[in-house]
Amino acid sequence: MSSLANNYNRRKISFKKGKGSFLYSSKGVRYLDFVQGIAVNSLGHSNPYLNKALSYQSKRVWHVSNAFEIPEGEKLAKRLSKNTFADYVIFQNSGAEATEVAIKVARKFFYSKKKPHKNRILCIKNSFHGRTLAAIHASGSKKMIEGFGPKIPGFDHFIFGNHKSLKKSITKKTAAIMVEPILGEGGIKLIPKWCLKGLRKLCDQKKILLILDEVQCGIGRSGKFFAFEHSGIKPDIVPIAKGIGGGFPLGAVLMSKKVAIGMTPGTHGSTFGGNPLAMKIGNAVLDKIMNKNFLKNVQKISKYFLNELNKIQAEYPKIIKEVRGVGLLIGLQLQKDQTNFIKKLEQNKLLTIRAAENVIRILPPLNVKKSEIDMSIKIIKQVCKNYQSI
Ligand SMILES: Cc1ncc(COP(=O)(O)O)c(C=O)c1O
């Protein structure tokens, strides 16, 4: 009997080794891993460049307190701000922490502006921003908060795609709107470019802040460094995690100079956030992702993959309702519950993962090879063919 608490519904499979797009089970079976730790291993398993960075830093200094200067962190923050909308960065260890800090930054901004009543955060109903107490209340999901009372105040919700509901929910107490540009757990649902532009405009009109949660869709996953870049807007605060660590626990909050005014010494801290080991790896991930041709390749292979998936959808419309996504953040929405289909893919040695709305999430590493995409296409086609006759 396991001594691990029962809070995960784990598949009966474990792995002894990973290399690039592949995982090798403890029974020696090779799987094409298009989960990659749920959009975490941006450069695949056991990437030699990341291994080298990890090994280099592990022999020097793993951890020092944020009471001291950390040059690798200075470097990573400088690179993140130089190449994005941001002026400042706070490092964390995970996505939920990053979204919580994003909320803290927004609230402290208005507090510093002598408007402490402006402290409510407006989010999409049934969205996903993590599993800490504040994050589950931000998500507004009844299922997620059940049993974890008392309810944490300070969050309002609007219905995805419902502009009336959005406008009605903004009050004098609203500090910020927080949304994912592409809802990952929510079923790879894109907020259209014109809607993101509209959101920016609305926030400016109402003098509130725009927080874009790029924990899942950021760091190249959408084919651009940030998913919001597709719409040409600039947010005020952006929590990130997952892909930036390439498999090492690392999160961060990026913010503009304007909103950073409240984050003075003592207002936030983290023992592990931004330690030298994490910073070295974050920099190594950026070395690859910020390389000029890297994102062009993500876009190119994404176009090919989406095209092939759409062909399968056209052939099997009774099984696949829709192909969703951008870059390598891809979803197959099935007509019915996806559990069995995911199982069949796994039996055919392709690992994928579920999302809301009967969606199967497909998340290859960003440096996936065309031959590996072809391998996955063949498996998906085969499963569709067999599925038809069930
Ligand atoms: C959009 C988004 N925000 C926040 C989180 C929480 O991240 P973590 O699990 O690292 O706390 C996730 C995790 O899936 C996410 O997809």
Image (cartoon, rainbow, N blue to C red):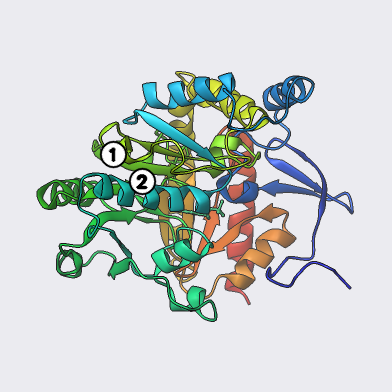
Q: Quadrant of the C terminus?
A: bottom right
Residue 153 falls left or right of residue 373: left
Query: Which mark, by number, is residue 259?
Result: 1
State whether residue 176 appears in this view: yes
Q: Which amino acid does the dot numbered 2 rest on? A: Val
Q: What is the total number of numbered labels drawn onto the structure image?
A: 2
Q: Quadrant of the N terminus?
A: bottom right
Residue at the image position 58 percent from the left and 34 percent from the top? 274
Query: Which mark, by number, is residue 155?
Result: none
Q: Looking at the picture, tell me which residue is in the foreground, 101 or 243.
A: 101
Mark 1 near mark 2, Cβ–Cβ under 8 Å?
yes
Mark 2 residue CB less than 8 A from any atom of ligand 1: no
Report x, y in % for residue 132.
Answer: 53, 62
What residue is shown with label 2?
Answer: 105
- The residue carrying pointer 2 sits among few (fewer than 14), some (14 to 19) or many (20 or more) residues within 10 Å by Cα, namely many
Report x, y in % for residue 372.
Answer: 64, 39
Report x, y in % for residue 46.
Answer: 73, 33
Residue 20 picture quarter: top right
Q: Secondary structure at mark 2?
A: helix
Report x, y in % for residue 21.
Answer: 67, 39
Q: Looking at the picture, tell me which residue is in the foreground, 208 or 181.
A: 208
Q: Looking at the picture, tell me which residue is in the foreground, 14 or 28.
A: 14
Q: CA distance from mark 1 to mark 2?
A: 7 Å
Position above or below: 376 against 136: above
Position above or below: 295 against 343: above
- Of all residues, the one furthest to the bottom in this rendering is 147
Residue at the image position 28 percent from the left and 58 percent from the top? 119
Residue at the image position 65 percent from the left and 27 percent from the top? 276
State whether residue 308 appears in this view: no
Q: Secondary structure at mark 1?
A: helix
Q: Which amino acid does the dot numbered 1 rest on? A: Val
Q: Looking at the image, is mark 1 or mark 2 earlier in the sequence?
A: 2
